[in-house]
Image (spheres, grey):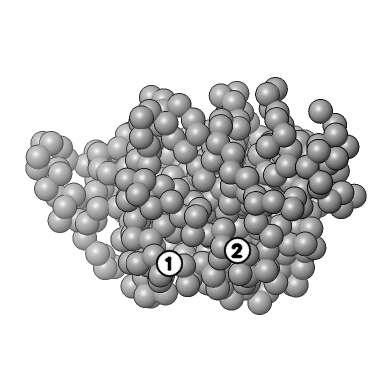
Amino acid sequence: MTYATVAAEHDLIPPHPKEAAQLSLFDQPHTDDEVMRLFFSARHAPCVIEREFWTAKQRQAHSLHEISYRACFKPQLPAYFIDRLTQPRDVVYDPFSGRGTTAIEAALRGRIPYANDINPLSAILCRPRIEPPGLEAVIGRLAEIPFDEKREECDIDLSAFYHPVTEGEIRALRRYLIDRRESGAEDDVDRWIRMVATNRLTGHSSGFFSVYTLPPNQATTPDRQAEINQRLGQTPPYRNVAALIVKKSRQLLSRLTDRQRRTLKEVASHALFLTGRAQQTTAIPDESVALTVTSPPFLDVVQYAEDNWLRCWFNAIDVEEVAAKMSVSRSIDQWSAEMEAALVELYRITRRQGFVAFEVGEVRNGKLLLDEVIAPIGEKAGFSWLGTLINRQQFTKTSNIWGVKNNRGGTNSNRIVILRKD
């Protein structure tokens, strides 16, 4: 069915010329009128569409995404919107960046990534993957690091996590990276090593520096780890820090093509990484962002600072200071106020005919649907609410491994509110 047919039948306003290529946002083999109406300024209520919008094949994410961070969406979500709503060199933004999924997907597609997060670990984990060094450069730099040099005082007891020699190597690496940063000598290779090491600090396999512990996106306390060790009858084995960094680097870079390297290099110099509140991003110019794809913290579901205390220590970040800046909304009214301020700021930086894809989930066992909260807040901020996409997928074995919790009846859903600045 053509646009002219749909427009005549439903009395739709003709799209802006740049929107002509965006009619395929919800295209499927079974496309219907309801789907096509979503991205037009219709004179009736926006529609809510529920189905599986990306196939199993589309879920094969790039290897650069394979780092752990609590509460992050899958790469195919931002990729879906980036492909359909932007052109190369457009700015794509995420104000709650987390591990940088939106930024990485944008950069791989030749878009300029802007990313912000209140947690300074976000930029540490994201920026190096926009500027990936070659594996040989990583190996060469690791060979220069004095891993056996003991210069750092033992400020915290990490013996429950690491073999004494492994702990010594981690402390030596930490000191080396701090010195490089403070002296102004830090480069893309140092930042890459820092990112990989931060991701390998603890985990539940031999690919991590630690003994068996919680998944890598959650760091338990030393006392709790001692209890785990006693219960499992385990002692921390020796792990070669440099060798594990090389192994993980090889994995992250495994699917990076020469063409993708060139694309990343072209956009990296224009990328912007901010650390601060999403409600105050003065470094981003007015009407500069073509598309925002984001997923904010959900009420009191996740305690980010508590999960990242060890990562903060390794990177010489004051975890208490970070925790004090983070807002953990305990009520829907408090959360709504935070989101309203963020959307007002998004309205300022979004260009005319630009879009926001605001992903929220089903919290409190599906009793609270946050998309129904966000849509009117977006309109209050000045956006047009075009509709809500509910992407519902079959619950798979892999999803169980990843610990997906917002599922009922064997499905995993994303609820994405679509806003546009007219």
Between residues 7 and 267, which one lies in front from this camera angle? Answer: 7
Task: Tally the marks.
Answer: 2
Looking at numbered disc 1 in the image, what kind of residue is underneath it? Answer: Trp
Residue 92, position as x, y percentages in the image: 70, 55
172 above or below 19? below
* Residue 94 image-quadrant placement: bottom right
Residue name at image x 45 percent, y 26 percent: 394
Residue 143, position as x, y percentages in the image: 51, 46
* Mark 1 residue element: helix
The numbered mark, 2 or 1, whose residue comes first in the sequence reads 1
Name the residue beneath numbered marker 2: 378
Name the residue beneath numbered marker 1: 335
Looking at numbered disc 2 in the image, what kind of residue is underneath it? Answer: Gly
Q: Determine crowd level at label 1: few under 14, some 14-19, many 20+ residues with C-alpha closer than 10 A.
A: many
* Mark 2 residue element: helix
Residue name at image x 26 percent, y 47 percent: 162
For residue 305, the mark is none
Q: Determine crowd level at label 2: few under 14, some 14-19, many 20+ residues with C-alpha closer than 10 A.
A: many
Q: Is residue 380 left or right of residue 18?
A: left
Residue 271, position as x, y percentages in the image: 70, 59
Q: Are marks 2 and 1 in contact (CB under 8 Å)?
A: no
The residue mark sitting in front, 2 or 1, is 2
80 above or below 377? above
Residue name at image x 35 percent, y 40 percent: 405
Residue 58, position as x, y percentages in the image: 61, 28
Q: Quadrant of the N terminus?
A: top right
